[in-house]
Image: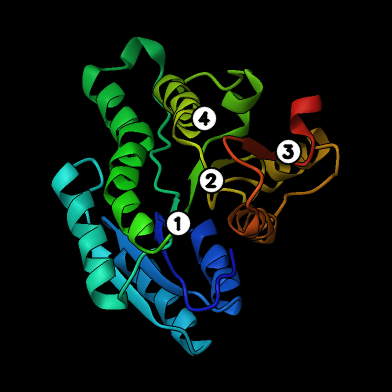
Amino acid sequence: MDLAGKTVLITGARRMGAGVALALARRGADLAFSYNRSREDVERAADAVRGLGRRAAVCRADLTKAADCDGLVAHVVKELGRLDVLVHMASRYAKTPFDALTERDWDESIAVDARAAFLCARAAVPHMRAASGGRIVFFADWLSRSGRPRYPGYLPYYVAKGAVGALTEALALLVNAVAPGPILAPPDMGEEERRAVERETPVGRWGGEEAIAHLVLALIETDFITGETVRADGGRHLR
């Protein structure tokens, strides 16, 4: 797909999403962003897109609600005239020990990481068909893609991201997923822990948002790769 003049909706653009948005805008796309709580981050990303001469729209939505997903897509089409690409990055990453895990914890993770992917895709597909085709890029995780539940305390997250991979296969054609590994260190991570991650990563470094932006671009531009969940983990799955 040639992105010039196309419209891309990104959900969950708080961290990696900003870099992805700028890469898409540089290829000529207009961008729409959704947020639930982090409006300031999304507004900054939208301003950066406008600074590149492209249009940007921002809309609040609770992606666990079907009505909000439908309303979000309708808002994008109203503001920007069309919808060609959905990049679903919204996620809930919360550590809870198994013995403390509640039904609510489980439901919230599944709702944000798996159910919302389906709801956003269901809302977006009719508009993509009206524009003679589109692309969907979901976000999974390198752990679930590799079948390695290595981090205790993230059971619902791991299961939900595994479901994203299954959804990707079931919805294809021209639906793919990205499975990030060590891309951006959490703000509260100490220096020694950051270095330990680098030592465990065969390429010896964190990927940075550019690694994700390049992969998302490739999956949007291809018309032959479909139903794939592609790891961007610097080789972590090999260790």
Q: If you read the primary sequence from the N terminus, does the residue marked by circle 3 or circle 4 appear first?
A: 4
Q: Amino acid at mark 4?
A: Glu
Q: Which residue is mark 4?
A: 169
Q: Please name the amino acid that badge 1 sits on.
A: Gly
Quarter of the image containing the N terminus? bottom right
- The Cα–Cα distance between marks 3 and 4, rounded to whole angstroms, is 30 Å
* Other residues around mark 4 within 10 Å, as few (<14) / some (14–19) / many (≥20): some
Q: Which mark is residue 133?
A: 1
Cα–Cα span, label 1 and label 4:
18 Å
CB contact under 8 Å: marks 3 and 4: no
Count of marks, rendered view:
4
Please tell me which residue lies in front, 157 or 119: 119
Disc 3 marks a residue whose amino acid type is Val
Rounded to the nearest whole Å, what is the CA distance between mark 4 and mark 2? 10 Å
Res 174 label: 2
Please rate how many residues cluster around mark 2, counting C-alpha atoms within 10 Å: few if below 14, some from 14 to 19, many from 20. many
Residue type, mark 2 in image? Leu
Q: Which residue is mark 3?
A: 197
Give the distance between the C-alpha atoms of the residues marked 3 and 1, in whole angstroms. Answer: 40 Å
Q: Position of residue 68 (x, y in %)?
A: 17, 51
